[in-house]
Image (cartoon, rainbow, N blue to C red):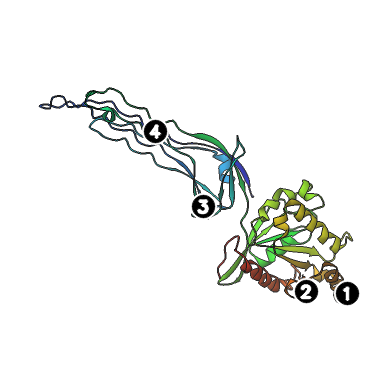
Amino acid sequence: MLIDRATIFVRSGKGGDGCVSLRREKYIPKGGPDGGDGGKGGDIVLVVDPHLDTLLGLTSSPHFFADNGCPGKGRSMTGADADLMIVPLPAGTLVFDKDTGEQLADISSPADRIVVARGGRGGFGNEHFKSATNQTPREAIPGEPCEQRTLRLELKLIADIGFVGKPNAGKSTLLAAVSRATPKVADYPFTTRSPNLGIAELDSERRLVIADIPGLIDGAAAGAGLGHEFLRHIERTTALVHLLDIAPLDGSDPVASYEAIRRELADYSPELAAKPEIVALNKIDLVPETDRREVVERIVAAIGGTGPSKPLVISGVTGEGTRGLLEACWDAAEKTEPAGWHTS
């Protein structure tokens, strides 16, 4: 199950208090002040954990409290600093301050380390206040207070390729055919109710991360159906595979379906609609061989595209054309900066 939203509460550590101490040793008159400083409180730091792909763990344990810094001691001993509190997140997590709505971070790289609550600095001990006119100060500064905030987390999957299309276009079947993913497959619309990720291995050195989102319907960008809820998951993809059911059981026109999905992508995000697109005419196995050429040519003529951009004919059930589709996906992913990970 994909959990793509979570709310957590974080609180850094308070700084340790400074110490008031006067040196008392035999044969050392007027030893003077020797109170040490307090230690720094622990920070709350967000990092990427490559083994995570969901926010599920945060829904059951949403509170993160860093330790306080230790107070200073006599003999000029500084209190120990508290350790960092590390909060691991999956790559692709957006972090917002829940109270203000401000976006604080976009956690997308293993190198990202975002401090969302800084620990308080330790206070000065009375040793800091000694002077020629104040040789026995009895004042110290308490440690700085902690920081606390409520964070709203949203996960955007990071994948190379995103599958889009109408419900029952065969996206989940195709994902299962080209990867080891096991999405739910059934003969009714909206089988996919949450995004699925799969890894397609073209060979030992080439892999593609593929995201399959729930089917889109007219008005999805405005909130209709299920797909609008997950369109953000394909915003990070390098290219899109637009899957068309070439033989829809409801008698709908594949060309009209293609144009409807293109409108929804453009309405949701012009940048998303501008991504490289591969059109795949799926379920060719359901079309009689005598009619295939005529059906395909009609759709291709209406959609347009020639050469490398010409629509591909595939079947997720029989595997026909899927190898060529993966090669086209690889070429599209290699032309721009990859969104997910793969080796070249």
- State the SS at label 2: loop
Image marks 2 and 4: residues in contact by CB distance under 8 Å:
no
Separation (CA) of disc 2 from disc 3: 42 Å
- Circle 2: is it few (<14), some (14-19), or many (20+) Cα within 10 Å? few
Give the image location of residue 293, x and y in percent. Answer: 85, 76
Viewer-side residue, 314 vs 112:
112
**Mark 1 packing: few (<14 Cα in 10 Å), some, or many (20+)?**
few
Q: Which comes sooner in the sequence, label 4 or label 3?
A: 4
Mark 3 vs mark 1: which is more N-terminal?
A: 3
Could you tell me which secondary element the residue under label 4 belongs to?
Answer: loop
Name which quarter of the figure residue 158 lies in. bottom right
Question: Of callouts 2 and 4, which one flags the residue occurring earlier in the amino acid sequence?
Answer: 4
What amino acid is found at the position of numbered circle 3 in the picture? Answer: Asp
Q: Residue at x 76, y 62 (%)?
A: 170
Q: Quadrant of the C terminus?
A: bottom right
Q: Earlier in the sequence, mark 2 or mark 3?
A: 3
Of the two numbered discs 1 and 2 in the rendering, the one whose residue sits closer to the viewer: 2
Kindly state the secondary structure of the residue where label 1 is placed: helix
Q: Which residue is mark 2?
A: 306
Lower sequence index among marks 4 and 1: 4
Alpha-carbon distance for marks 2 and 4? 66 Å
Residue 110 left/right relative to 138: right
Q: Position of residue 161 (x, y in %)?
A: 66, 62
Check disc 1 and report the residue beneath it: 294
Q: Amino acid at mark 4?
A: Gly
Residue mark closest to the camera, 4 vs 3? 4
Identified by mark 2, the residue type is Thr
Where residue 15 is drawn, which disc sits there? 4
Which residue bears the numbered disc 3?
A: 49
Outermost residue on the left side: it is: 27
In percent of the image, x 88 and y 77: which residue is there? 290
